[in-house]
Image (cartoon, rainbow, N blue to C red):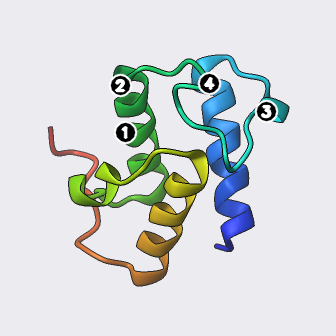
Amino acid sequence: MTREQVFEKVTQKMAELFDLDPAAIKPQSRFEDLELTSLDAIDLVIELQQMTGRKVSESGLRSVRTVEDLVAVIHAHLAQGSGPPRSTSSP
């Protein structure tokens, strides 16, 4: 998946989850600019883990401040195929 495709998926998911206008979501948008809380970020991470089928590491997410940061983490994660696939039957 290309970076542009990841950005598109992230934008779609954010618009769906948080009732945002997709046109308002830019790569440089900070989560607080979009009025998202830390709980919203957790919801987004859960959705993205389901999208990728893999667990996203906390250390990778700590540096995320903008939508582009999130796209970069997910893109690198998908490109590396790091970690075991996340089981959908585990808690």
Check if mark 1's residue and mark 3's residue have beta carbons within 8 Å: no
Residue at image mark 2:
38
Q: Dots 3 and 4: beta carbons under 8 Å? A: no
Q: How many labels does the image show?
A: 4
The Cα atoms of the two marked residues, 4 and 2, are separated by: 12 Å
Q: In this view, does 61 lie above or below 36?
A: below
Q: In percent of the image, x 64 and y 73: which residue is there?
A: 1
Mark 1 lies on a secondary structure that is helix
At 53% from the left and 65% from the top, the residue drawn is 72
Q: Is residue 9 left or right of residue 76?
A: right
Which residue is the site of mark 1? 46
Left or right: 13 as drawn, with respect to 86: right
Q: How far apart are marks 2 and 3 (CA)?
A: 20 Å
Q: Which amino acid does label 4 sit on?
A: Leu
What amino acid is labelled 3 in the image? Pro
Q: Residue 22 carries which label?
A: 3
- Residue beneath disc 4: 34
Mark 4 secondary-structure assignment: loop
Q: Residue at x 67, y 47 (%)?
A: 28
Q: To which quarter of the image does residue 23 belong? A: top right
Q: Which of marks 1 and 4 is nearer the N terminus?
A: 4
Q: Give the structural element (helix, strand or loop) at label 3.
A: helix
Task: Return the x and y of residue 77 as percentages of the image width and height.
Answer: 41, 71
Closer to the chain start, of discs 1 and 2, is: 2
The answer to the question of whether label 1 and label 2 lie on touching residues, with beta carbons closer than 8 A, is: no
Question: Can you give x and y, in whole percent of width and height, for residue 76 in the image?
Answer: 47, 74
Q: Is residue 9 above or below residue 39?
A: below
